[in-house]
Image (spheres, coloured by chain):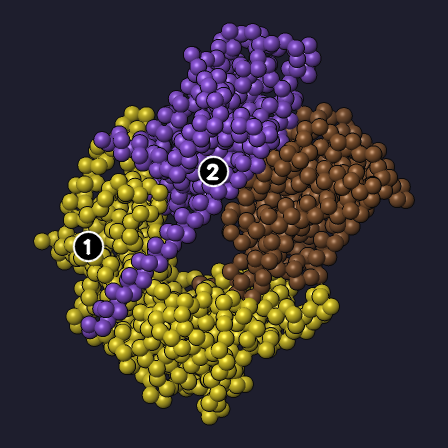
């Protein structure tokens, strides 16, 4: 049975592959371009440079976090605990800044370390104890939020500098807001990890076929640990960016952000079953959401209608992309 | 005797360990804190967590299928807003408002089922999208925004206000929950639907081969999830005599946590509504109790997370133990084989 | 009584898949009160036959008569006609009770969908009493031992008024004692005039339980006789075919196999699976590990490679005692492993062929900590050309390749590095004849290059063709160890059925 099936497909592979590849690689970009054209046709200012920069600025926070969480989903896991990590990282960065005479580096170090430790804990439960990721991170979401509230109280903590810290969220280089550089840098770094390193290949392999990966001698447990650590550090970076942007830290920051992060990844076409997906697709997914929000605001669509549209567009984009792929494979 | 047996089985399937843990928690808090064992506190716990219990019972249906419904929080907000509009904006009678609310919940569940069955989206993604969309719809129809004066107007319809209340020390919400648990447990144990549901969740292929209409069962599960959420929304609307657009935010995670703590497996096919309700109250009792014995107000969240981890860890541990038993049996078999071969 | 009435008569059933004729004018008669065994090696056409009987697929030609009237149609139509199948995979819902599982989807109800428990219980009790089955109706299925789960499936089939029950490898998950218990149930069914089609690899069981046997090979019915009229030897010969490929006999020079032992295990045991295994594989030698299904050969090689490590015993590589707790340990020692289920355990179906080949030896293509595309191209292309993988490209996904080419990709994975000891589990199952010959040729080349090759194979023809030495396992023990000069089919089969030689 295998043979005859194989022979049929083997013959066609040559002709199918380029188109399929094209659609796999660019189907989403087509959707992004179509959306941009529609918005521009209705409101030409949409395509203006300022607005484009605005969109990038708006998506940089979610985008950074989503890019860092992509590996988790590629391994078939999920990280619901990024929200409270945002809050904790912001708080501890600010605490360290105040305690250490406003020195930037220790603050950042403590903030990112928070994310690392949180991610490590998730990773241990998922990779070592083999507990289901959705429950582990649901639990740690509750635990981390509790810890954030216990340590940060219910009051808003004002940030009084240093300027170098505030620069992270609101500074500009060459007319571009600094968060865009963070987003771009993190995305490039992750893309590099994914495409150029053994770790990136391990992520693919573990997500697609864990048993085969083990038989190839790949470090399955270490890979799973690392993806949760990266997700945690990404969330912490998001927390630092947020706190710097609004110059406050608060134990309730990041509530519900996990779903936005997952939406960006899923919209990029990464399957929740693992084994597929890519960092650049998540970037496009984040841009789609950002462009959508921005365009609808420009068209004076009210917030509530935006939310409805967002839900429906997510569904449509996923279904459309899916259908396109199936059609291409035929 | 049969009844005792079935009660025992009910407890067992809802995780007997959990039940005793719950009893111990109550006893310990009662001994440590006089306030905890006071009537008013008991009432607080009952009224504070019954609606979460109701939503958790609804969530148990998709979970038993191996699915999930992330949109319950948004459905709650939407239903509450429909009721709010019906009575304060449109001045419809209370019973119409209640019916409209329930219908909204059913339709929201139906749309989820449509996305999952017809559009073939994964339940997680489908309900993630409707989580956003239903919340948007709530803002869109918000009577508070259409007529800002209404934000300070309380609902006065007696029927609506009568939805929440108490007899003696027992809040209505808790009575609803008890009725819902009894009804759903009856469905689970005594109707075709219940058996079909476990079959679809436990072995979808076998269910299909046995001629069960899998899509009908799935649809019903998501509809029930919406419906029970609507009941909880009515309770809250009645209690607050108003609503807000953000009502129910984050509720989905509490409901899932309650279900998992109550022994409902996320893989489907195992668990029941009694467990889910028990899970909700365990969360409630722990949270309240910890605050009362002087742990700061935020510790409960940590504790709930830890309990959730213990619950799922315990589940894994019992599976591992099951495997060990299986191995022991294999060992026994191997011994039997070797003795059989040495004889021949 | 009702015995010997023909319940099902299938004539000239044919089914073609692409170029392959999976079933070729097959005839069969199932009689009431008979256990009819269906045997054949992997890919002989048994499963196609079963699928036609259950209505899962439709035959291209031929007809089926049940009680003299023609039947055709989907699974439901076949069920209604009285054919039920007990599959290898459980069709039960673990958390539900025996009572509910037996009547799943057909429970009697009263108004509002309430279950009529009383009627249901009475119906099931009557059914069990009639067929003399004893089951705890209220126990959830997951709490039952495997043999009782099979009995629940039998009861489920009977409750459908099935007169013909197909059983696909029903003893696969059962212990020795449990098999006896199942056989008692089957004999009772026979007495009650049920026709049973019994599909199994276990020839001993067939001689114990069956009345009639049909042998299929290459889609054709080769033999259909009462079991009493046939010897085990003839049965096996019919199953395998006579054309033993003596001409494709070993092409590498035996004298090359050196005395040096590459891989050895002593007293290797794993509870409930295998016990006290001593095995040696020399350099330049091809050792075939054979036996019946359930002899735990795969389990043994998986332990050797560290996939599921053994509990006790020692493993030596080139005479040095080693610890292999993880596949990585084995790979570092220069071992390679091609698993039995290449789709499930071997290939990454969505990654490219290039990645699949290089996956176990990533360090060889890592430059300064980064993966070098150039190195991957070089290494991968060498394998693709060398192995003749079609299409000869590194950038296609393996799921688009044929089974034979997929297997070549997996072989390429181990030929890439400095693999000295290669273990293959059923390397040619589901692979066409041409590629099979390629793979045999390759194995001989490996042995000629002084590598040690250990093959798990159930295909006796294959074993006789490629092996320098044949080791036979039965029920978790080694029961035979033959040089290729002395080995014969008969010896292998005697050892495989548990006789210690």
Farthest residue to the left: give it. Answer: C1
Q: Residues within 10 Å of mark 2 (few under 14, many from 20)?
A: many
Residue B48 visible in rendering:
yes
For image coordinates 73% across by 44% down, the residue present is A111
**Chain drawn in yellow:** C
Residue B96 visible in rendering:
no
Percent position of residue B191, x then y: 32, 31
| Circle number at residue B75 | none
Residue placed under numbered mark 1 in the picture: C185
In which quadrant is the N terminus of chain B drawn?
Answer: top left
Q: Gap between marks 2 and 1, in whole Å?
A: 41 Å
Residue placed under numbered mark 2 in the picture: B260
For image coordinates 66% across by 41% down, the residue present is A85
Given residues A84 and C47, the one toward you in this image is A84
From what the image shows, is residue A220 above or below residue B81? below
Percent position of residue C245, x then y: 39, 82
In which quadrant is the C terminus of chain B drawn?
Answer: bottom left
For mark 1, name the chain.
C
For mark 2, name the chain.
B
Farthest residue to the right: give it. Answer: A174
**Chain drawn in brown:** A
Residue C95, located in which quarter of the rendered image?
Answer: top left
């Amino acid at each position: 049975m295998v043979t005859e099936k194989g022979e049929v497909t083997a013959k066609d592979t040559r002709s199918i592959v380029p188109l399929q590849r094209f659609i796999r690689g660019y189907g989403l970009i087509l959707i992004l371009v179509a959306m941009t054209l529609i918005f521009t046709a209705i409101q030409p200012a949409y395509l203006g440079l300022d607005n484009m920069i605005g969109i990038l600025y708006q998506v940089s926070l979610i985008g950074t976090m989503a890019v860092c969480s992509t590996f988790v989903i590629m391994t078939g896991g999920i990280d619901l605990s990024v929200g409270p990590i945002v809050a904790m990282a912001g708080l501890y960065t600010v605490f360290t800044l105040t305690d250490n005479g406003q020195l930037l580096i220790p603050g950042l170090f403590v903030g990112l370390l928070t994310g690392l430790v949180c991610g490590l804990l998730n990773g241990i439960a998922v990779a070592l104890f083999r507990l289901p990721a959705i429950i582990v991170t649901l639990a740690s979401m509750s635990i981390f939020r509790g810890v954030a509230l216990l340590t940060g109280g219910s009051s808003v903590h004002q940030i009084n500098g240093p300027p170098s810290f505030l620069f992270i969220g609101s500074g500009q280089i060459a007319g571009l807001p600094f968060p865009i550089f963070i987003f771009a840098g993190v995305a490039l770094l992750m893309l590099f990890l994914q495409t150029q390193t053994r770790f990136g290949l391990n992520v693919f392999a573990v997500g697609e076929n864990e048993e085969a990966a083990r038989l190839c001698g790949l470090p399955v447990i270490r890979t799973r640990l690392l993806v949760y650590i990266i997700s945690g550090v990404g969330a912490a970076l998001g927390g630092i960016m947020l706190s710097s942007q609004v110059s406050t830290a608060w134990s309730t920051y990041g509530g519900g952000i996990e779903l936005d992060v997952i939406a960006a990844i899923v919209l990029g076409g990464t399957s929740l079953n693992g084994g597929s997906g890519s960092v650049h697709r998540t970037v496009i997914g984040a841009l789609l959401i950002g462009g959508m929000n921005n365009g609808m605001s420009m068209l004076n669509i009210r917030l509530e209608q935006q939310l409805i549209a967002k839900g429906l567009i997510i569904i449509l984009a996923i279904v459309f992309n899916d259908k396109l792929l199936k059609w291409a494979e035929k | 005797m049969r009844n005792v047996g079935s009660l025992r089985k009910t407890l067992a399937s809802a995780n007997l360990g959990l039940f005793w843990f719950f009893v111990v928690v109550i006893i310990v808090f009662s001994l440590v804190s006089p306030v905890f064992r006071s009537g008013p506190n008991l009432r607080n716990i009952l009224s504070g967590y019954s609606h979460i219990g109701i939503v958790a019972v609804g969530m148990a249906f998709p979970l038993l299928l191996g699915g999930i419904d992330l949109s319950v929080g948004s459905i709650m907000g939407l239903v509450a807003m429909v009721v709010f509009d019906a009575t304060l904006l449109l001045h419809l009678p209370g019973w119409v408002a209640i019916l409209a609310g329930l219908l909204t919940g059913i339709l929201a569940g139906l749309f989820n089922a449509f996305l999952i069955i017809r559009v073939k989206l994964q339940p997680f993604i489908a309900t993630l999208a409707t989580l956003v969309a239903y919340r948007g719809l709530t803002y869109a129809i918000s009577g508070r925004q259409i007529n800002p004066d209404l934000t300070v107007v309380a609902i006065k319809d007696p029927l609506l206000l009568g939805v929440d209340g108490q007899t003696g020390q027992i809040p209505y919400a808790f009575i609803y929950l008890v009725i819902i648990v009894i009804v759903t447990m009856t469905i689970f144990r005594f109707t075709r639907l219940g058996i079909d549901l476990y079959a679809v969740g436990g072995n979808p292929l076998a269910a299909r081969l046995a001629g069960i209409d899998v899509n009908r069962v799935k649809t019903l599960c998501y509809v029930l999830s919406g419906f029970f959420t609507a009941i909880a929304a009515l309770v809250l609307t009645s209690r607050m005599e108003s609503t807000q657009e953000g009502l129910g935010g984050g509720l989905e995670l509490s409901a899932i946590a309650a279900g998992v703590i109550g022994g409902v497996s996320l893989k489907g096919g195992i668990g029941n509504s009694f467990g889910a309700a028990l899970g909700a109250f365990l969360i409630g009792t722990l949270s309240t109790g910890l605050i009362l014995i002087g742990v700061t107000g935020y510790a409960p969240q940590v504790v709930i997370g830890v309990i959730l981890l213990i619950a799922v860890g315990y589940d894994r541990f019992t599976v591992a133990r099951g495997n060990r038993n299986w191995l022991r049996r294999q060992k026994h078999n191997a011994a039997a084989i070797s003795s059989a071969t040495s004889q021949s | 009584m009702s015995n010997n009435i023909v319940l099902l008569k299938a004539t000239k059933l044919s089914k073609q898949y692409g170029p392959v004729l999976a079933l070729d004018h097959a005839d069969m008669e199932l009689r009431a009160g008979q256990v009819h065994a269906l045997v054949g090696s992997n890919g002989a056409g048994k499963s196609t036959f079963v699928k036609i009987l259950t209505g899962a697929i439709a035959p291209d030609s031929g007809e089926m008569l049940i009680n003299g009237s023609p039947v055709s149609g989907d699974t439901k139509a076949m069920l209604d006609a009285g054919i039920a199948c007990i599959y290898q995979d459980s069709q039960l819902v673990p958390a539900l009770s025996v009572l509910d599982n037996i009547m799943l989807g057909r429970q009697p109800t009263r108004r509002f969908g309430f279950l009529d428990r009383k009627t249901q219980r009475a119906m099931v009790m009557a059914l069990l009493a009639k067929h003399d089955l004893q089951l705890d109706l209220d126990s959830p299925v997951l709490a039952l031992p495997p043999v009782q789960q099979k009995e629940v499936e039998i009861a489920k089939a009977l409750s459908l008024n099935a007169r013909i029950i197909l059983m696909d490898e029903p003893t696969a998950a059962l212990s020795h004692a449990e098999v006896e218990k199942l056989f008692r149930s089957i004999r009772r069914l026979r007495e009650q005039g049920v026709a049973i089609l019994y599909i199994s690899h276990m020839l001993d069981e067939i001689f114990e339980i069956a009345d009639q046997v049909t042998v299929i090979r290459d889609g054709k019915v080769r033999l259909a006789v009462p079991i009493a009229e046939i010897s085990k030897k003839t049965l096996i010969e019919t199953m395998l075919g006579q054309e033993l490929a003596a001409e494709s006999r070993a092409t590498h020079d035996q004298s090359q196999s050196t005395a040096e032992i590459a891989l050895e295990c002593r007293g290797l045991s794993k509870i409930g699976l295998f016990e006290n295994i001593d095995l040696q594989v020399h350099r330049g030698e091809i050792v075939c590990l054979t036996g019946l299904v359930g002899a735990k050969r795969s389990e043994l090689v998986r332990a050797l490679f560290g996939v599921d490590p053994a509990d006790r015993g020692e493993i030596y590589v080139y005479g040095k005692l080693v610890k292999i707790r993880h596949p990585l340990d084995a790979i570092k020692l220069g071992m390679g492993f091609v698993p039995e289920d290449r789709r499930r355990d071997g290939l990454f179906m969505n990654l490219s062929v290039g990645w699949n080949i290089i996956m176990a030896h990533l360090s060889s293509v890592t430059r300064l900590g980064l993966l070098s595309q150039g190195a991957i191209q070089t290494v991968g292309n060498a394998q693709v050309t060398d192995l003749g993988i079609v299409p000869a490209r590194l950038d296609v996904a393996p799921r688009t390749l044929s089974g034979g080419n997929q297997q070549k990709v997996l072989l390429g994975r181990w030929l890439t590095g400095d693999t000295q000891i290669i273990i293959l589990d059923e390397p040619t199952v589901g692979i066409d004849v041409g590629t099979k010959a390629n793979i045999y040729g390759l194995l001989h080349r490996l042995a000629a290059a002084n590598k040690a090759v250990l093959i798990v194979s159930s295909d006796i023809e294959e074993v006789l063709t490629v092996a320098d030495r044949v080791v036979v396992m039965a029920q978790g023990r080694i029961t035979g160890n033959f040089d290729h000069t002395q080995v014969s089919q008969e010896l292998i089969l005697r050892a495989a059925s548990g006789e210690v030689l």
